[in-house]
Image (cartoon, rainbow, N blue to C red):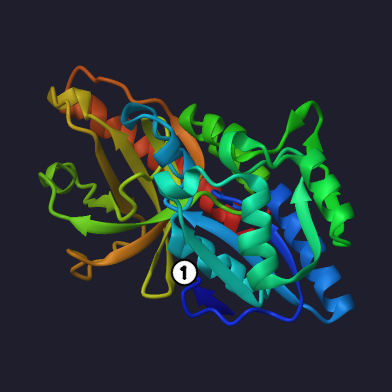
Amino acid sequence: MEIHRNLNSFTPLASSVITIGSYDGIHRGHFHIVNRLLSIANSTEAQSVVITFNPHPRHVINSENDKIKLLMSLDRKIEIFKKLGIDTFIILEFNKDFMKIKAEDFMNNILIKYFNPNYIVAGSNHSFGYNRDGDSQFLMKFCDENKIGLEIVDPIIDGKTTISSTNIRKLIKRGYVRRANYELGSIYGFSAKVIHGSGRGKGLNFPTANLKPLEKNQLLPRNGVYFTMCIINGLNHYGMCNFGTRPTFEEDELVLEVHLFNGYSENLYDCNIWIEFLERIRSEKKFSSVKKLTEQLKIDKSKCLLLKDKYELGE
């Protein structure tokens, strides 16, 4: 996959099949769009192209206090699109000037000029351009006038729920990670750096690695205890993670810490690891004593170990 972070030295394509979007938290609906993109590109022998934006448009359009938290880092998006088999991945810088480009100007001065699309694949609820004037109706009219094929892909609906990045964010913030993982079509997780902590876990005979997400705008789950899996140096390590303020110790700083079940003892400080949130075990709670907390941690671990057996058996 070719990756271009601007179009300054980009050689225009003879033809392409293209889709445009933020693609934060690539989910089942996104996979459907990309599968159609790849199918059409293969049948027409054209380049498959995905155009995305960095930073996320809402980080520029919204106020500083209204920035959305991200489901997925840019590096993770690149990794997924590469595995899917996209030919060309374009990352356009989204800033105040770019925000003011009208949809028609974007189509003429960027899409047609550089990519010569013979087909565009778009989600039915996607819009782009200044004041979001590039909606489905605009695309139908523009593509008809310019002899460009267009496929509008309907969203995936499960029951009464429309699968979307917005809904998945809500699920994760409420702690419903298992449902979020279903809608994602993958496991919610992120890269994090192991940092020094207070060492309380070791004192409780539950040694932990304290984690700091690499993506500064990373969406974090609701406070609580989770059954997790960490990937370290290519190997899987199941464990349980606590995310919260450790109220039993009268603390107020948010801490993300994971206890690995296999007693993985390698010095992990300053290492980057990948953590996935498989299921939520319970809410955060203040205990009357350290002894009560330790007793609860043993119960939590037993629950997680039962889940571990099920996950390892693929149930």
Please, is residue 35 above or below residue 154 in the view?
A: below
Left or right, residue 286 beside residue 177: left
Mark 1: secondary structure? loop
Q: Residue furthest top?
A: 288
Please give the name of the residue rendered at 44% of the width and 36% of the height, measured from the top-left corner: 61
Question: Relative to 126, is 11 on the left or the right?
Answer: left
| Residue 235 picture location, percent across and down | 43, 72
User: How far from the left and from the top, in percent, is residue 304?
Assistant: 46, 45
> On the rendered image, what quadrant is the N terminus found in?
bottom right
Q: Specify few, some or many for label 1: CA neighbours under 10 Å numbering under 14, 14-19, or 20 or more.
A: few
Camera-side residue: 169 or 254?
Answer: 169
Q: Position of residue 171 (x, y in %)?
A: 55, 31
- Asked which quadrant contains residue 83, the reply is bottom right
**Residue lying at 70% horizontally and 59% vertically, measured from the top left:** 19
Residue 156 visible: no
Identity of the residue drawn at 55% across and 67% down: 90
- Check disc 1 and give the amino acid type: Asn
Residue 58 coordinates in the image, percent (x, y) = 47, 38
Q: Is residue 218 left or right of residue 195?
A: right
Q: Nearer the viewer, residue 10 or 90?
A: 10
Q: Nearer the viewer, residue 75 or 304?
A: 75
| As drawn, 252 above or below 150 | above
Q: Residue at x 61, y 32 (%)?
A: 167
Q: Nearer the viewer, residue 315 or 134?
A: 134
Give the residue pinned by disc 1.
6
Q: Is residue 254 left or right of residue 102?
A: left
